[in-house]
Image (tube, grey):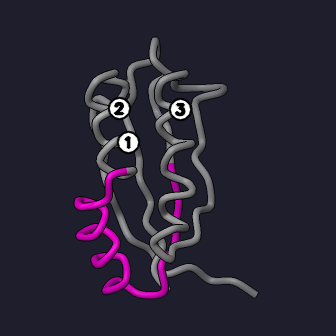
Amino acid sequence: MVTCYLRYIIDPSKVTDFEEYAKMWIPLVTKFGGQHHGYFLPSEGANNVALALFSFTSLATYEAYRTDSLKDSECIAAFQFAEDTNCIISYERSFFRPVFD
């Protein structure tokens, strides 16, 4: 299993737009066989950092999701929403191996 960690720098005046974007992606990750662990929006501390975590059974499954998402109309709409609203300034992606009981 591999967990994708996304750290976003967002426009603090567009947190509501980013939240809408996040809510679009949670079911899409599930649709492509992943398990979404949620988005985490600014609360206390930095007002421009948001996080997301989701897992796939393997890096190969994640890569298939990335390729297939570029052809999916719902994913394309989510990408377009982020572009239209400019709610995301930048992001970084890292991968981890989770440890569960």
Residue 17 shown left or right of residue 45 in the figure: left
Q: As shown in the figure, which amino acid type bears the numbered disc 1?
A: Ala
Specify the quadrant of the image occupied by residue 83. Answer: top left
Residue 72 among magenta residues: yes
- Frontmost residue, 31 versus 40: 31
Residue 28 shown left or right of residue 59 in the figure: right
Residue 37 shown left or right of residue 76 in the figure: right
Label 2: which secondary element: helix
Q: As shown in the figure, which amino acid type bears the numbered disc 2?
A: Phe
Q: Which residue is mark 1?
A: 78
Instruction: Give the residue at x 51% y 42%.
Output: 22
Q: Which residue is mark 3?
A: 20
Magenta-tinted stretch: 52-73
The quarter in which the C terminus is drawn is bottom right
User: Number of marks in the image?
Assistant: 3
Residue farthest toward the top in the current orientation of the protein = 13
Picture coordinates of residue 33, whole percent (x, y) = 50, 77
Residue 49 vs 16, above or below: the answer is below
Residue 18 among magenta residues: no
Q: Residues within 10 Å of mark 2 (few under 14, many from 20)?
A: some
Residue 101 vs 8, above or below: the answer is below
CB within 8 Å, label 1 to label 2: yes
Residue farthest toward the front in the current orientation of the protein = 73
Q: Which mark is residue 81?
A: 2
Picture coordinates of residue 19, whole percent (x, y) = 55, 32
Residue 26 vs 56, above or below: the answer is above
Label 1: which secondary element: helix
